């Protein structure tokens, strides 16, 4: 059965608003498809009506259970976020807070629902902040059970205090392109290994 | 051939000074040995006379080339550090700065010297800071090519503003013990998979 | 005219749900009142129906303009948040994103709306993360124009991987109490100085 | 008596090696001098032979006591560091670790040696990381008693994954110039207020 990758777009803008994060996440998904990881779509997080909380279902009107199902069904998570004030955008932290429930949802062997899944991080901003956003996401995603492939982040930011958007660049900068393809190649390789041989029991 | 794990102790204290970081790193190495990953020793970083810099050899008197060789020879890196002011200790950042040279030392296929290696992070402090230290180390180590296994960090800290040391606890707290064993089990599993089938070419 | 302090409670729980963050913010406000800074209430952020965005008004249904007015009307901001996955809770990042608009709302002399205001940070969690949360908030609040008094953070967290809540402790731990009073005393002093003599023109 | 400002350059390079951090720190000191804060020199930290540790004097050969004296003698600290792997350079963390001793060196009223001193942060890198470095330094410096003026950071970084140095730019980018002058003006104003009326007793 084919392995799949789900994209998350943690932009603050919903609907069809143009999104640099969407573009970079799509590029990662395309690069994963080159390694036979099938794209399973991109969730625009602010449109998913996710409730604030740390459980897997916060009740009536909570959009998280549907997003959670898609994350659990996929093998690779491409976690995309813009940078605001040097931090992951608030929808990214909302997702991490909901994923926190994985810590209490272990199987009989103590493994979390993300066990065997691989996460790639995609970060864009007008300027400055990608490494730190990557650090926050790597740690948060790893705490809830995702594996991080070598060079598991791709990103673009402009010069200090500038305002150009990634989606308005005439071309994808060469280095970001290479970084995207490497992250995808490594994620595809690693998730295939883990699909063939999952982690042992915890503790 | 046996796979091996090297420990790094980034304590500010050298020589034989008692070290909580040493204890936790040793516990990770012991747990890895239970999964047939052979311990390759622990480097007390402040005693290794590592020069400030970002190349792989800063010349006469630089202790880094010897440490670098041990890192390259090992399959798993157990990166242990205390917390100071909520941050990784300065020897930890010195090691990351020297590992930065890996970015320019790729093989013919664009893979860094850490390709296929797995990193586990071990953090101790009197109080507060482990998650952030883990975030900094995960991102830094991942940038230079290490893979991070699911739940790849173990740690202990005390209550806010307290001063108890990990090594002075009567017993290893149960949760830290489970976390250590899980990180080790996952690292052992993952490095074995990668030893059997390395990452594809970059880019 | 009296100087005032507004509290923000970035708990994930709304309504009247018991909140450790609420308790610590209230303690800071009480300590500020001892220095004649009048409390101007506490905003439970998740109940304020703040829209995702980075402008000062995201249109119909956006609760931010009302919260923004209270922040602008106060002299001290007591920014309280719980820790989730080692990070500030998502409502905290939502507030920072909305405050980002201050960068473009300078007066004729280039000063942001937060110029002359002082921020204190109050952080609680079951375990680990206060220093990093403080770092994120100090930098974000400083970027948008707040001044940070010496020792401008108070916090409490439990031992690693424990689950006790601050509000369930039999008493306020002595060290947290001292830290709260010091942060409040310093904030009160500093805001009084700045109220008497505001910052010069920017740039 | 004149108020003074000391610069710290946490570059990894010592001696007379050209340093972008040196340039930015010098620009802050010049801007402070425009507000009658006298420059007290710049410490090239790696040349100061600071020992690893957390006390104020680690014994024979330790260069810290001399640096510490200059910090204590100055009213403003201009803390400059390059970015490595998205983090403050290791000499910056070494300085923070030594400043940690301030926590235990309070006066009869519980005030640390940095009480009444103001810190400005200056960060440069080829790319990405300034906000996070600022966050780490703000929090570390604030924990040991420094006050952070509004907009207390200046910085420059290039586009993602680029390699231009700040000191090789044809001119200082306009926005960095404005930011430098604002940080300096605010620091000068704030330290003058605090020199006239110091913080009250702690706790």
Image (cartoon, coloured by chain):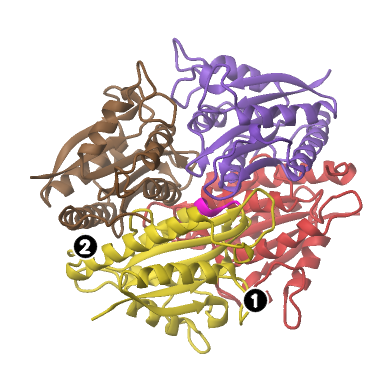
Chain colours: A purple, B red, C brown, D yellow
The vertical placement of D93 against C82, above or below, is below
Circles 1, 2 touching at the beta carbon (< 8 Å): no
Query: Is residue D78 shown above or below C106?
Result: below
Looking at the image, which residue is at 72% across and 82% down?
B61
x and y percentages locating residue D199 in the rendered image: 20, 64
- Dot 2: element: loop
**Residue C106, picture quadrant:** top left
- The overriding secondary structure of the stretch rendered in magenta is helix
Q: Where is residue D107 drawn, in percent x and y? A: 23, 74
Q: Nearer the viewer, residue D56 or D121?
A: D121
Per the image, the residue denoted by label 1 is B47
Residue under the point 36% across and 40% down: C102
Picture coordinates of residue A129, whole percent (x, y)? 56, 46
The residue at 78%/51% (across/down) is B117
C152 with respect to D174 (left or right): left
Choose top left, top right, bottom left or bottom right for residue B88: bottom right
- What chain is tagged by disc 1? B
Q: Which mark is residue C114?
A: none
Q: Which mark is residue D202?
A: 2
Q: Residues within 10 Å of mark 1 (few under 14, many from 20)?
A: some
Q: Is residue A125 left or right of residue B29?
A: left
Front disc: 1 or 2: 2
Percent of width and height locating residue D52: 53, 75
Name the quadrant of the C terminus of chain C. bottom left
Q: D176 or A8: which is nearer to us? A: D176
Report the front residue among D185 and B57: D185
Q: Which residues are magenta?
A: D128-132
Is residue C116 in view from this perspective? yes
Query: In the image, is D177 to the left or to the right of B96?
Result: left
Q: CA distance from mark 1 to mark 2?
A: 39 Å
- Which secondary structure lies at badge 1? helix
Circles 1 and 2 on the same subunit: no
């Amino acid at each position: 059965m084919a392995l799949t990758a789900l994209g998350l777009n943690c932009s603050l803008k919903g609907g069809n608003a143009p999104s640099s994060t969407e573009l970079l996440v799509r590029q990662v998904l395309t690069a994963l498809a080159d390694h036979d990881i099938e794209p399973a779509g991109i969730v625009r997080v602010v449109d998913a009506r996710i409730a604030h909380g740390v459980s897997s279902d916060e009740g009536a009107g909570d959009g998280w259970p549907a997003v959670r199902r898609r994350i659990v069904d996929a093998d690779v998570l491409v976690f995309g976020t813009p940078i605001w004030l040097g931090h992951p955008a608030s929808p990214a932290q909302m997702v991490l807070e909901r994923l926190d429930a994985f810590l209490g949802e272990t199987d009989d062997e103590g493994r979390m629902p993300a066990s065997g899944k691989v996460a790639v991080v995609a970060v864009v901003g007008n300027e400055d902040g990608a490494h730190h956003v990557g650090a926050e996401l790597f740690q948060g995603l790893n705490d809830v059970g995702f594996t991080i492939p070598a060079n598991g982040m791709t990103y673009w930011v402009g010069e200090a205090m500038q305002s150009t958007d990634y989606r308005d660049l005439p071309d994808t900068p060469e280095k970001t392109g290479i970084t995207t393809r490497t992250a995808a190649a490594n994620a595809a390789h690693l998730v295939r290994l883990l699909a063939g041989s999952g982690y042992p029991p915890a503790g």
